[in-house]
Every structure is written in C-alpha cells, then in structure tokens.
Image (cartoon, rainbow, N blue to C red):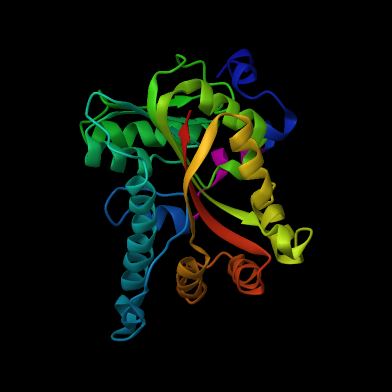
Amino acid sequence: MSSNHGSAVLTSLYQHSVADYWNAERNPVNLRLGEVDGIYHHHYGVGVVDWTVLDGPEDTREERTIAELHRLETAQADLLMNHLGPLRPSDRVLDAGCGRGGSSLMAHQRFGCRVDGVSISESQVAFATEQAERRGVDDKVSFHFKNMLDTGFETGAYQAAWNNESTMYVELSLLFAEHARLLKRGGRYVCVTGCYNDAYGLPSRAVSEINAHYICDIHPRSTYFRELAANRLVPVSVVDLTASTIPYWELRAKSSLATGIESAFLDAYKGGSFQYLLIAADRV
C-alpha cells in the first residue's frame, strides 16, 4: 500500500491507530465463531441463551459454546436487518464499518440487494472480499478500503445503511452527515450501539475500561438523537437491547474465548451506566 493511498482514507492519527489495531487483530472470539458457518461477525449477541451447552461431555463443551455464541451474534444481525425496511434486489445498501463482512453477506443473502461494505482496516477488507468470492457473490457484495465519514460514493445512491457497533470510532456529526448524503429520501438508517446513559452522569469506570480496551470513544445516548435530528435522520424505532444482551456476556465470560473485558460490560450494563440500543431512522 502506498502511503498516499492510506492517507487519503485515514485522515487522523487516531484513525491510523484504530486501523493498526484492526489490521493486527486475530482474536479467537471473532475467528472461531466465524468458522462455524463462514459468517464472521464483529459485534455481540442478543437473545435467550441455551445454557445446556455447558452440560454434557467436557471434550465438546467448547464447540457447543462457540456455536451458541455465534447463534446469538447472528440473531443480533438479523434483528438489525428486520429494521432496514422493505428492500428489493435492485437496491443498494451500505455496511459502514463492515469488519470481516458478516452482516454484508447476510444482507445480500436475505434481500438479494447490492451491498457495499467499508472499513479502514485493509486486512478486514481483504478477508471479507475473500469470503464474498468464496460464496460466489462478489459481483453483488463488494468491500472497500474507505473511510465511512467520507466514502466518495454517489449522493443518494443507497436505500439503506447501517453501523453495527462501529459508531464509537467516529464523531457522530460527521458520520450522520455522510449517511444523510448517501441515503435516498425515505431511505433507512439503522445502528446498533453501546452508549453511555446520560441519566447516570459521566462515563462510569466500566465504560472507560471498554473505551481503553477497544481504543474507542463511547458516546452518550443524547448525542445520537441530537446528531440524527441535525442531519435529517428521524428515528422511527428505538429498541433498548440491554437486558437481552446481558445473557450473551454471561455465557461468553464462562467460555474459553473470554478476553477479560466481559466483567466491564456486565458491570456497566447491570449498573445502569451503559445501554445497548438499536436505533432506526428515516432520511427525510
């Protein structure tokens, strides 16, 4: 990669540090789960846990636990897609901060639409592209080394766009301005995110630990709604997923794939300083 190429995409030292983190990331909690069915997620799970996976033969317990964690993460992506509105195969959709491409592949599988995924991690883009090629859908699902704050894609080209746990890496005013530019009038934007609870006060110690672990900056809940409104994105539905993500974290904490951040998430969610939200908004 020529440095000019990189500098056109990465516009700050912070973005370089985030790209470096994700280019080097080989976390089993992401890779082992993706190996279950070739859909690699970079987000967390929701729903009722099947705790029986911890019972039975010890030699296959890890395999059962991994499959269950992956099922919960896939359920989270499905839930996000339930809010994208009616999509036709002729529509284009954008996966902003696409990671290793799991949600993009699921969206194409479900709606048949054209998908563009963008990431500032070149290794993620290469990995996701290989997954699309392997599935024979690379004519419809494309991954790009681009910055979601300035994609260069055509204005008004997209019927839907989403961020699945990637908004905490950017300024929301810049992000939502770009989504508003890219979406058609009446198009749908969805994000699933962890945000800190304004009612709690400033970020709690557990939220600060999460920020440090992922080199991110978790926004307060209020900033989402202020910046959506400022950028012609009007919420149509808001779902508090906090209670339904806690079981996922409890299972992950008991698994061999625990990364040490589980207790911070559980403390933050249970203590009320942190919330897991789905927000769907229409471009007006």
What is the quadrant of residue 21 in the picture? top right
- The answer to whether 183 appears left or right of 12 in the picture is left
| Position above or below: 74 against 64 | above
- The answer to whether 244 appears left or right of 91 in the picture is right
Whole-percent x, y for residue 234 in the image: 52, 37
Whole-percent x, y for residue 253 in the image: 52, 73
- The answer to whether 163 appears left or right of 40 in the picture is right
| Position above or below: 40 against 144 | below
- Total numbered labels: 0
| Residue 19 falls inside the magenta stretch | yes
| Position above or below: 242 against 17 | below
Furthest residue toward bottom: 56
Q: Is residue 209 visible?
A: no
| Position above or below: 26 against 56 | above
Q: Main secondary structure of the magenta part?
A: helix
Whole-percent x, y for residue 232 in the image: 55, 29
Whole-percent x, y for residue 30 in the image: 45, 54
What is the quadrant of residue 107 in the picture? top left
What is the quadrant of residue 98 in the picture? top left
State the extent of the magenta-drawn residues as a range. 18-27
* Viewport quadrant of the N terminus: top right
Q: Residue at x 32, y 69 (%)?
A: 63
Furthest residue toward right: 202
